């Protein structure tokens, strides 16, 4: 069963551009992963420091493999100390 993820990353205002760059860099290699069904970055309209990554993966194992990739590790390192929070919600299809 597929798995959706909504990841909200809130940048410290002074690091907004750095966080955005790091998020942009993780998109192409993530989309290239065989089990990635959807991977798209959004910006919250009324909160420009809040980025939302909407993802869909084939299954939980695919997400776990994604989180073990070098490009995901690079993202985590690049945003370290530059965000006020990261909230990850895993969603199962309702139907």
Image (cartoon, grey):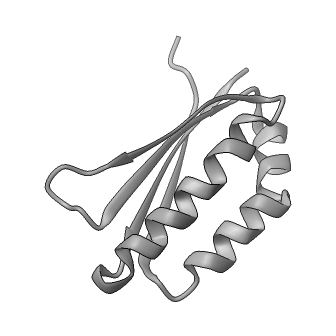
Kindly give the residue lying farthest to the bottom in the view shown: 81
What residue is at 81 percent from the left and 38 percent from the top?
62
What residue is at 28 percent from the left and 80 percent from the top?
13
Task: Give percent across and percent down for residue 71.
Answer: 77, 60
What residue is at 18 percent from the left and 49 percent from the top?
45
State whether residue 59 is above or below residue 26: above
Position of residue 12 in the picture relative to residue 77 (left or right): left
Q: Nearer the viewer, residue 70 or 65?
A: 70
> How many badges with numbers are in the image?
0
Q: In which quadrant of the rendered view does residue 70 lie? A: bottom right
Q: Nearer the viewer, residue 94 or 88?
A: 88
Task: Give percent across and percent down for residue 66.
Answer: 79, 49
State whether residue 69 is above or below residue 35: below
State whether residue 55 is above or below residue 74: above
Position of residue 43 in the picture relative to residue 53 (left or right): left
State whether residue 16 is above or below residue 12: above
Position of residue 88 in the picture relative to residue 45 (left or right): right
Task: Give percent across and percent down for residue 4.
Answer: 58, 33
Position of residue 66 in the picture relative to residue 16 (left or right): right
Q: Which image quarter holds the N terminus? A: top right
Task: Give percent across and percent down for residue 19.
Answer: 47, 70
Kindly give the residue lying farthest to the left in the view shown: 46
What residue is at 77 percent from the left and 38 percent from the top?
60
Kindly give the residue lying farthest to the top in the view shown: 95
Q: Nearer the viewer, residue 16 or 87?
A: 16
């Amino acid at each position: 069963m597929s798995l959706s993820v909504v990841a909200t990353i809130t940048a410290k205002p002074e690091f907004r551009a750095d966080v955005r760059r790091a998020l942009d860099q993780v998109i192409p290699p993530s989309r290239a992963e065989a089990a990635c069904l959807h991977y798209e970055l959004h910006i919250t309209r009324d909160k420009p420091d809040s980025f939302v990554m909407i993802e869909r993966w084939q299954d939980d194992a695919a997400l776990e493999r994604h989180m073990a990739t070098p490009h995901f590790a690079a993202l985590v390192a690049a945003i370290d100390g530059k965000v006020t929070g990261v909230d990850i919600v895993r969603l199962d299809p309702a139907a």
